[in-house]
Image (tube, grey):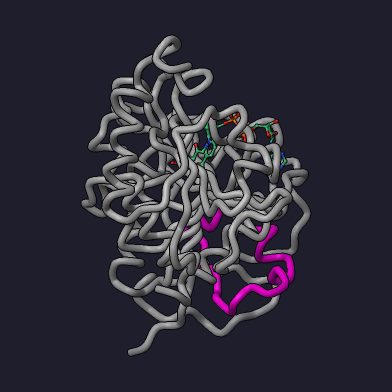
């Protein structure tokens, strides 16, 4: 039987803002221009009902079976594929007993995507620290968890904001319309240099170029690559990774047909002269690229995992434990992430 094209929204860390954002999404009208995809929350229906009441939203979670079509849409109802909390959850108070709950919501969504019961998954934020505390050694985030769950060798974290969220041909032409990808994701800074290998850069750039074409319709992507060191190494005086690893790798990939600028000093790459005509920037590490992206569009950006055999988008923020239960969290990034997943699902 043909299934309705739904997006699975994992509701994330139960003590964070994810559950109330799911409720707020169900309470509001779809963002303008969003392709018609229904959202089914993945999480504990009781938790969602409690957060709806706490934040003053008249939203009723309706339990549905993941292997059956959703009931007809009704205003004020939020369909839920149920996953039971392992322990009661209070806003702002982390409990390692719920780590398995959070991971199970991801497993349910991945299975639904792989079985074509969902057109894609959108993830509300989880708390990496509490999952590690619960004993899931090596857990570093959705991106790496989904890589392993899908059995692929490499994935790429890309954040986008503004017009750069949408499939189009035109490259950067001014304004806060950025796509920023990362060569390394959740690594301590002291381990970044060793992780910047020719093999990793080649895998990341190959996926990035292919998925800019696939998901964003960029026919011949041009990617600007940051150096690792100040002034891209200052000719080897401030670090040798550019000379020994990054430059030769870019050279080899150019010979294979990729259009790559750099390595460029990261402090000047994010200026109009260097961004003009660029389709994405590759930063070497998390806090080299993401502060710029978040300055340009925090709350209106989405995170996309490239290289997966399924559509996954996410919010640009974390669990915001300080806001959980208050109803004051900004819904903007989740709306953007849902709209982008719906758009990507049309191209899948
Ligand atoms: N997609 C995901 O699952 C992500 C998870 N995280 C995780 O979240 C946890 C907390 O991370 P932090 O660095 O504290 O970042 P955070 O994004 O949770 O909070 C940073 C600041 O932004 C504010 N903020 C965040 N989201 C907001 C929203 N929707 N509306 C209004 N204000 C908002 C918070 O109140 C706080 O002041 C960490 O465990 C981190 O790993 C962080 C980023 C993404
Ligand atoms: N800063 C982005 C981030 O931490 C997102 O991580 P992930 O859980 O989506 O892998």
User: Between residues 55 and 256, which one lies in front from this camera angle?
Assistant: 256
Is 110 rendered above or below residue 191? below
Residue 34's place in the image compared with 48, above or below, is below
Give the residue drawn at x 70%, y 37%: 295
Give the farthest residue toward the top.
237
Question: Does the magenta run of residues contain 309?
Answer: no
Q: Give the range drawn in magenta.
A: 20-46
Residue 245 shows in this picture: yes
> 320 above or below 54?
above
Q: Which residue is drawn at 30% across and 28% down?
A: 245
**Location of the N terminus (image quadrant):** bottom left
Query: Could you say which quadrant of the image residue 17 lies in?
Result: top right
Residue 19 seen in the figure: no
Q: Give residue 284's position: percent from left, percent from top.
A: 44, 31
Viewer-side residue, 163 vs 70: 163
> Can you tell which quarter of the image residue 76 is in?
bottom right
**Residue pictured at 73% horizontal, 48% vertical:** 330
**Residue 122 placement (x, y as % from top left):** 50, 58
How many numbered callouts?
0
Q: Is residue 45 magenta?
A: yes
Q: Which of 59 and 129 is in front in this view?
A: 129
Residue 316 as seen in the image, left or right of residue 251: right
Q: In which quarter of the image is the C terminus?
A: bottom left
Q: Position of residue 49 (x, y in %)?
A: 62, 56
Residue 85's place in the image compared with 66, above or below, is above
Task: Please identify the quarter of the rendering in which residue 272 is found.
Answer: top right
Residue at x 27%, y 30% (from the top left corner)? 197
Q: Give the percent coordinates (x, y) of residue 151.
A: 21, 51
């Amino acid at each position: 039987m043909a299934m309705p094209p739904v997006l699975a929204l994992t509701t994330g860390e139960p003590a964070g803002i994810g559950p109330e954002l799911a409720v707020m999404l169900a309470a509001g009208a779809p963002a303008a221009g969003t392709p018609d995809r229904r959202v089914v929350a993945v999480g504990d229906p009781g938790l969602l009902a409690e957060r709806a009441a706490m934040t003053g939203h008249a939203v009723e979670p309706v339990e549905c079976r993941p292997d059956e079509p959703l009931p007809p849409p009704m205003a004020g109802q939020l369909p839920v594929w149920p996953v039971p909390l392992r322990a009661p959850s209070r806003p702002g108070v982390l409990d390692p007993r719920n780590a398995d709950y959070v991971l199970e919501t991801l497993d349910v969504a991945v299975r639904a995507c792989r079985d074509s019961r969902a057109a894609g998954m959108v993830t509300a934020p989880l708390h990496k620290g509490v999952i590690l505390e619960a004993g899931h050694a090596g857990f570093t985030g959705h991106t790496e968890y989904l890589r392993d769950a899908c059995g692929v060798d490499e994935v790429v974290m890309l954040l986008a904001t503004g017009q750069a969220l949408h499939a189009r041909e035109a490259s950067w032409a001014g304004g806060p319309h950025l796509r920023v990808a990362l060569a390394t994701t959740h690594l301590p800074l002291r381990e970044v240099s060793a992780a910047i290998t020719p093999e990793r850069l080649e895998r990341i750039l190959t996926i990035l170029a292919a998925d800019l074409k696939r998901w964003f319709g960029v026919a011949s992507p041009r990617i600007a690559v940051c150096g690792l060191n100040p002034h891209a190494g200052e000719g080897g005086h401030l670090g040798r990774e550019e000379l020994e690893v990054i430059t030769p790798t870019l050279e080899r990939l150019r010979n294979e047909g990729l259009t790559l600028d750099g390595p460029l000093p990261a402090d000047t790459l994010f200026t109009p002269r260097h961004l003009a005509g660029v389709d994405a920037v590759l930063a070497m590490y998390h806090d080299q690229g993401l502060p710029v992206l978040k300055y340009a569009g925090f709350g209106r950006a989405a995170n996309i995992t490239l290289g997966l055999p399924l559509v996954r988008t996410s919010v640009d923020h974390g669990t915001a434990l300080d806001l959980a239960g208050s109803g004051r969290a900004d819904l903007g990034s989740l709306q953007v992430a849902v709209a982008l997943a719906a758009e990507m699902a049309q191209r899948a």
